[in-house]
């Protein structure tokens, strides 16, 4: 088992609010190896984007004080400032967005959009246009077989290991006529509370200018995400799903 030099609380405080920014080596090592912290920042970033889209109102003073008091009672004094800030952000989300779902399924889209927006930036990337090379590299990284689809008019750029709602997921990035397209092979039948079985209808979602299509296959969920019209991303998803169901060449 990996022995971290920092606890999760310490690493999150050091990396807050952007885990991709400059950071001490120990905090960066902890984040790269800790799925819980990766998931924490994914959720926080999703909350931030939702807050930006929602109508701005003032959080009632009594709610603010209740959150502040509850957090202060639970956390050591030296870290209260950071946890209060995070708690107040969550309180604001509850106050103005509880029970709301953005148009096009933001809740489903966010885990994929957060990673699609990063394209081939760190942490784990492998740049190549050869599908077999990328598949082999991804298999070593995740320990399971990975098959990448041959998408019409698209050129492979490379592979990544990403964090989709806390799930370690192999992904491939394509260039489709100048637009980056990310394909996700999630080794789970459920993401962000959504699930799909093989042969079920495509699930469409959108967020931050990205369109996302998600579907089920026997060994987990698959998804494609890109900044392109929904009809086009649906056609690509149908192509990938059809090839997988028929066992055609990937």
Image: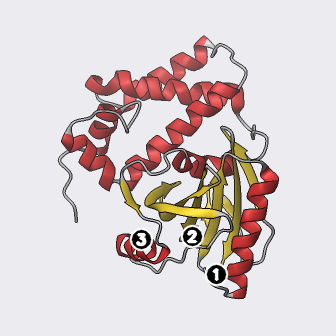
Task: State the SS at label 2.
Answer: loop
In the rendered image, which quarter contains the C terminus? bottom right
Residue 243, x across and y down, in percent = 70, 80
Q: Are marks 1 and 2 in contact (CB under 8 Å)?
A: no
Name which of mark 1 and mark 2 comes first in the sequence: 2
Please determine whether, in this image, residue 227 is positioned above or below residue 83. Answer: below
Per the image, the residue denoted by label 3 is 138
Give the quadrant of residue 190: bottom right
Q: Nearer the viewer, mark 2 or mark 3?
A: 3
Where on the picture, by quarter, is residue 225?
A: bottom right
Where residue 24 appears, as percent x and y from the top left, is 21, 36
Asked whether disc 1 touches disc 3, contact meaning CB atoms under 8 Å apart, the reply is no
Question: Would you place residue 221 above or below residue 7 in this image?
Answer: below
Tell me where residue 86 appears, x and y as whole percent: 46, 29
> Which numbered disc flags the more N-terminal residue, 2 or 3?
3
Q: How is the image coloured?
A: secondary structure
Give the residue displayed 52% in from the left and 24% down from the top.
Answer: 88
Mark 2 crowd level (few <14, some 14–19, many ≥20, 10 Å Cα): some
Q: Is residue 168 left or right of residue 227?
A: left
Q: Residue at x 79, y 73 (%)?
A: 200
Quadrant in the picture for residue 238 = bottom right
Q: Dot 1 surroundings within 10 Å: few (below 14), some, or many (20 or more)?
A: some
Q: Which mark is residue 188?
A: 2
Looking at the image, which residue is at 53% across and 54% down? 165
Estimate the spatial distance between the alpha carbons at disc 1 and disc 3, rounded to whole Å.
19 Å
Q: Is residue 166 visible?
A: no
SS label for mark 3: helix
- Whether residue 157 sits left or right of residue 26 in the image: it is right
- Relative to the observer, which residue lies in front, 240 or 43? 240
Q: Which residue is mark 1?
A: 218
Q: Mark 1 vs mark 3: which is more N-terminal?
A: 3
């Amino acid at each position: 088992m990996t022995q971290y030099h920092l606890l999760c609380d310490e690493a999150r405080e050091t990396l807050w609010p952007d885990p991709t920014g400059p950071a001490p080596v120990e905090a960066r090592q902890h984040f790269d190896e800790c799925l819980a912290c990766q998931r924490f920042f994914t959720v926080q970033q999703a909350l931030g984007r939702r807050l930006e889209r929602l109508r701005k109102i003032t959080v009632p003073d009594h709610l603010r004080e209740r959150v502040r008091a509850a957090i202060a009672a639970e956390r050591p004094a030296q870290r209260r400032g950071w946890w209060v800030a995070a708690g107040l952000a969550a309180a604001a989300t509850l106050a103005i967005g509880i029970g709301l779902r953005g148009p096009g399924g933001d809740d489903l889209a966010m885990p994929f959009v957060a990673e699609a927006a990063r394209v081939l930036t760190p942490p784990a990337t492998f740049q190549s246009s050869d599908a077999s090379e990328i598949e082999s590299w991804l298999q070593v990284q995740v320990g399971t077989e990975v098959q990448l689809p041959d998408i019409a008019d698209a050129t492979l750029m490379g592979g990544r290991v990403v964090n989709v709602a806390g799930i370690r997921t192999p992904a491939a990035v394509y260039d489709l006529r100048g637009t980056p397209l990310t394909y996700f092979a999630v080794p789970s039948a459920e993401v962000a509370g959504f699930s799909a079985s093989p042969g079920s209808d495509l699930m469409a979602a959108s967020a931050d200018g990205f369109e996302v299509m998600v579907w089920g296959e026997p060994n987990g969920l698959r998804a494609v995400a890109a900044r392109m019209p929904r009809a086009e991303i649906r056609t690509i998803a149908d192509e990938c799903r059809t090839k997988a169901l028929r066992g055609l060449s990937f």
